Amino acid sequence: MNAPQVQHITSRDNPLLKTLRRLTQDSSAYRKLGQVWVEGDHLCRAALARGVKPLIAVFSESVWSQANVQWAGAARQNIVIADALFASISALESPASMGFVLELAPPAALQVAAPSVILDRVQDAGNVGSILRSAGAFGFKQIIALKGTAALWSPKVLRAGMGAHWGLQLIEGVGLIDLSALTLPIIVTSSHRGAYLHEALRDRALPFPCAWALGHEGQGVGVELEAMASLHMRIAQPGGEESLNVAAAAAICLHASATVATPRL
């Protein structure tokens, strides 16, 4: 097998660097370009561990001599650029000195019976990434993002997801009408109505598989989606806070479902 090509880039105006800047600065650019930028050792390793073959690996000059030994065969092509140029494409305050350009996978088909998480206009990228981590950890492999939700493959969501993306089926831009195809119950989270989660778990009244619907940070789940729900659930908050952060609520709810699916958990 031939060794991957190595190209040294010295111009700020190089077309590849312009593309990388678009991917890091525009959260939805990956949809237009069909490519995803992941930066840093952890995310790059997570992608490789899931069998992803990068199109391009990008390194700063200062790390290339060491990276050449460890990473040279990871991608189809290696790019080496000056440290200052890498800083110009990085989305991090402290650039990680390496990253991958990945091909964006084709849109996945909705699996009507798969344990799912429905994101209804959840807009904070950190929340979305954290929810993806919890979903992967607790066996909810399908993420259904309704229109208005933060872009799932944006750099901020990728960083917050910490590698969870490559173990999940991610479906974006879904409309409410598409949810009617689901054959499992939809559970809507609420801070003020419905059964208490711990009581449903105690009484074995929590269905599995199911689809948990999590709503906008301020407005919650929309009225139309609420009307589609089989159950409404709320989390007891004896400390007296008005509501939980949506990512924290997601972790609690998904863990509860995981205990139904795996009683010894």
Image: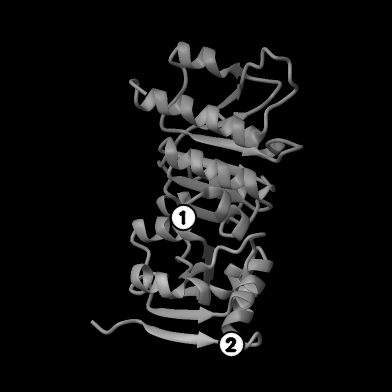
Q: Quadrant of residue 69?
A: bottom left
Examine the rendered structure and indicate whether residue 20 appears above or below residue 130. Answer: below
Q: Position of residue 255 (x, y in %)?
A: 47, 28
Examine the rendered structure and indicate whether residue 52 appears above or below residue 68. Answer: above
Question: In the image, what residue type sits under mark 2?
Answer: Thr
Q: Which mark is residue 122?
A: none
Q: Position of residue 182 (x, y in %)?
A: 47, 42
Q: Position of residue 207 (x, y in %)?
A: 44, 25
Residue that appears at 68% across and 20% down: 193
Residue wearing tag 2: 10
Question: In the image, what residue type sits under mark 1?
Answer: His
Depth order, front residue of 8/63: 63
Depth order, front residue of 205/240: 240
Rate crowding at label 1 as few (under 14), some (14 to 19) or many (20 or more) other CA atoms within 10 Å: few
Residue wearing tag 1: 42
Residue that appears at 69% across and 52% down: 148
Residue depth check, mark 2 versus mark 1: number of the one nearer the observer? 2
Name the side, left or right, on which 109 lies relative to 238: left
Q: Position of residue 179 (x, y in %)?
A: 54, 45
Examine the rendered structure and indicate whether residue 82 appears above or below residue 169. Answer: below
